[in-house]
Amino acid sequence: MDERTKELIAVGASVAAHCQPCLRHHIDQAAALGIGRDEIAEAVAIGKMVQRGGLAAMRKFADTLLDQMPDSQKSDSKAVSEKKPELKIYEPAMCCSTGVCGPNVDPRLVAFAGVLKRAAAQGVSVKRFNLGQEPQAFVENTQVKAHLAQEGPENLPFVYINGERVFSGRYPEAAELFAALELPPGEAGPVSAPQGAVLMASIPDAGGN
């Protein structure tokens, strides 16, 4: 196997493993070998598919185990499995709680606010914290505090579902977020936003997904 192929595999594996330092290293190595952006982006996309497949398989496996529990123990487990997910977003410092204010509004934030509104309408608990207005929330959550110390504020936002970080360094697209929340895909259609709004860039800003 040649070095180019090895590095492209390593890029995809870094995404699937949620290893951001690994992803940065292997993208740099791939670029040094003369591998173009399009090939690297394809490797990242494959890594994301593997990541989503593994997550879906584990959730299905967990549900199967719950279903196999004795009837005497099922009532509490069923209540937990049917509980709507909790979504928490820890964001960089912004002028207001959503960033959708002032004369120069980021269209990505407008689109993301619409996605969160639809998620909340389906019963998802949605909480947002920004570093400028609610720094204490970043300190009180030990997981967030550790991620922030390791990666720095430049890698915000961090997106957690039920305490598990599923995206970082960017706002997820509607389809990605709804898939992670296990909500119907039909609910993740296009979000209205100002003309020229773009939900997300097409290339790997993050390995954490």
Image (tube, rainbow, N blue to C red):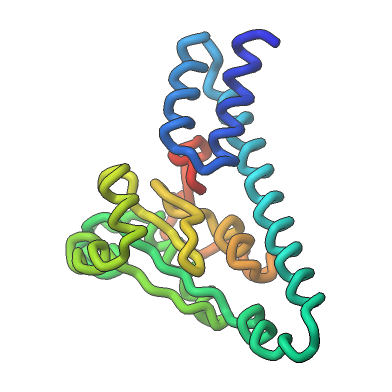
Residue 204 drawn above or below residue 161: above
Residue sitting at 65 percent across and 78 percent down? 81
Out of 151 and 177, give the one closest to the viewer: 151
Residue sitting at 43 percent across and 59 percent down? 159
Q: Is residue 100 visible?
A: no
Instruction: Residue 90: name its quadrant.
Output: bottom left
Q: Is residue 51 visible?
A: yes
**Can you give x and y, in whole percent of width and height, for residue 128 in the image?**
35, 69
In the picture, the quarter occupied by the N terminus is top right
Residue 5 drawn above or below residue 125: above
Out of 206 and 38, give the one closest to the viewer: 206
29 with respect to 9 (left or right): left
**Can you give x and y, in whole percent of width and height, for residue 122 in the image?**
58, 81
Residue sitting at 52 percent across and 9 percent down? 34
Residue sitting at 50 percent across and 69 percent down? 162
Residue 32 drawn above or below residue 107: above
Residue 70 drawn above or below residue 1: below
38 with respect to 196 (left or right): right
Query: How many numbered marks, from 0 up?
Result: 0
193 with respect to 69 (left or right): left
Instruction: Residue 6: name its quadrant.
Output: top right
**Can you give x and y, in whole percent of width and height, for residue 97 in the image?**
27, 70
**Can you give x and y, in whole percent of width and height, for residue 58 in the image?**
69, 58
